[in-house]
Image (tube, rainbow, N blue to C red):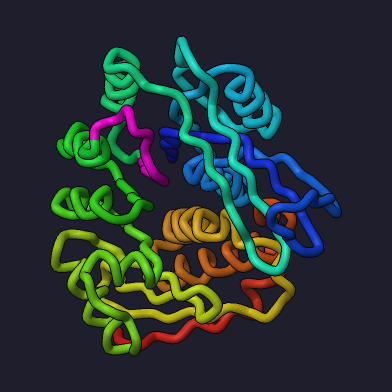
Amino acid sequence: MVYTLTMNPSVDYVVRLDKLKEGLTNRSLSEEYYIGGKGINVSFVLAELGVKCTALGFTAGFTGEEIEKRILDSGIDSEFIRLKEGASRINIKLCSCDETEINGRGPVISDDELSRLMRRIEKLRDGDTLVLAGSIPDSVPDDIYERILQSVSNKNIRTIVDASGELLRRCLSMKPFLIKPNKQEVSELFCREINSDEDIRDCGEALKNLGAQNVIISLGGDGAVLFGDDGGVYHCGTVKGITESTVGAGDSMVAGFIAGYDKTGDPGYALKLGTACGNATAFSKGLAKKEMIQKIIKCSDLKIVKG
């Protein structure tokens, strides 16, 4: 079973504009509502790929009720902890020439509510996969991901961390199965500019030496590079298309990698499926659908840089 954890889920309000005019009244071309949060996005795409998963996390208030309802309507299992106070956040995504995001802070999580989550995670079994994705609320300790990984370290559980900065750095010593920073996040981790393929190789190998078993470095329109647990280095490019929104594309890549690795055990194929899922989301209004994923993966270009 795959479990995804979203500490701070949201209702994402996507507003499409011809052009954003600051300080003036803007009228939208269209609006859509989606259930957001990196772990939840992973769950939705996994379900699209036929992988059974359970969404974990916290919800609160009327927005939390909507999050749980939409997940249930999608046929995804969930075990959210309902918070006594506050409301799950609303994130505003303004899509015009550029993408502008205004993300809410979310509710306060008490020590008791956090302990309930830890007790649930401790029930995971050998063979399960646990995805820790996204930022954490201000009310949660900075080392929470590290503590979660420690709590399951005595079991044969595949752990995936999709986070940035210190939150990610703290997890590396726990040897996560997969991490997926983008180029900018890698630059910030190592306090250096990433300008060449050699820079990417150096940083990818450094992240593996720090403990990560598989490292995907996302390169945006240039695809992604995987430093695999088999010692191989793989590059998969993107396909051409009209980008609707990049929101959720990275999460879709994580879902595709999980599904691809579970199916074949081949990290190269897993990267190819992950990149196709990321592309499919970028080309869609919402998250990737199976039909588009299958169409894109046939056109994807996978190269083994070092094997």
Magenta region: which residues? 129-141
Percent across and percent down for residue 218 are 43, 70
Secondary structure, magenta segment, majority class: loop
Q: Is residue 131 magenta?
A: yes
- Which residue sits at x=26%, y=74%? 204
Q: Quadrant of residue 64?
A: top right
Percent across and percent down for residue 28 are 82, 51
Task: Please indicate, yes or no, whether residue 1 appears anywhere in the rendered image.
Answer: no
For the C terminus, the image quarter is: bottom left
Looking at the image, how many numbered discs can be counted on the residues? Answer: 0
Q: Quadrant of residue 2?
A: top left
The single residue placed furthest to the top in the displayed view is: 84
- Horizontal relation, residue 219 to residue 46: left or right: left
Q: Say which of 302 and 16 sits in front.
A: 16
Task: Please indicate, yes or no, whether residue 82 appears anywhere in the rendered image.
Answer: yes
Q: Is residue 198 magenta?
A: no
- Which residue sits at x=70%, y=51%? 286
- Horizontal relation, residue 10 to residue 7: left or right: right
- Which residue sits at x=62%, y=68%? 279
**Position of 191 relative to 256 (above/below):** below
